[in-house]
Image: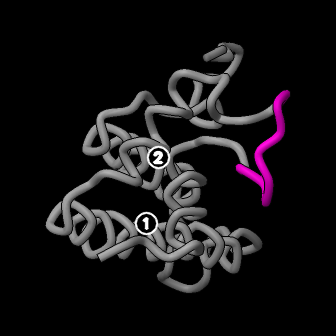
Amino acid sequence: MAFTDAQLTDIRRFAGYPAYGAVATAAESYRFFTAYGALEYKLQHLSANEQTVVVTTYLANLYTLETAIVGASSNLDTDSASVWKHNKSEVADRTALFTQWRVELCGFLGVPPGPALASPGLRLVV
């Protein structure tokens, strides 16, 4: 089993790494960034069982969690309606859970979370 191009793009994105692009250039190639190179190496050398875990456990849940964050925006305009009370931290709670799963994906792959998952004010240069 091999990942599709769309799955590879989503794995990179969920892991917090920037877009790879269609053609590697000398200035921006992952080969010049240790962590990104490790991610690419892992993605090309996972066993079929490991790829299945990534697709069925991580990608399936990350797609659902990401969509739920966007779906929560439909409740942002209502604080309470009759007996229903809006969870004011719903988006933050969903985002934290989504981020947790993204970091766990990185842990499973054995790579550090990418720059997009860095703490605010802290940029990881690899």
Give how far apart the Cα atoms at labels 2 and 1 are: 9 Å
Tell me the residue at 44%/32% (across/down).
38
Mark 2 neighbour class, 10 Å CA radius: few under 14, some 14 to 19, many 20 or more: some
Disc 1 secondary structure class: helix
For this rendering, which residue is in front, 116 or 75?
116
Say how many tags the image has. Answer: 2
Which residue is identified by label 1? 62
Disc 2 secondary structure class: helix
Residue type beneath disc 2: Thr
In the picture, the quarter occupied by the N terminus is bottom left
93 with respect to 2 (left or right): right
Tell me the residue at 60%/54% (across/down).
13
Instruction: Indicate whether 25 appears above or below 22.
Output: above
Which residue is identified by label 2? 99
Tell me the residue at 78%/54% (across/down).
21
| Residues at marks 2 and 1 touching, judged by CB atoms closer than 8 Å | no
For this rendering, which residue is in front, 88 or 35?
35
Which range of residues does the magenta coloring cover? 20-27
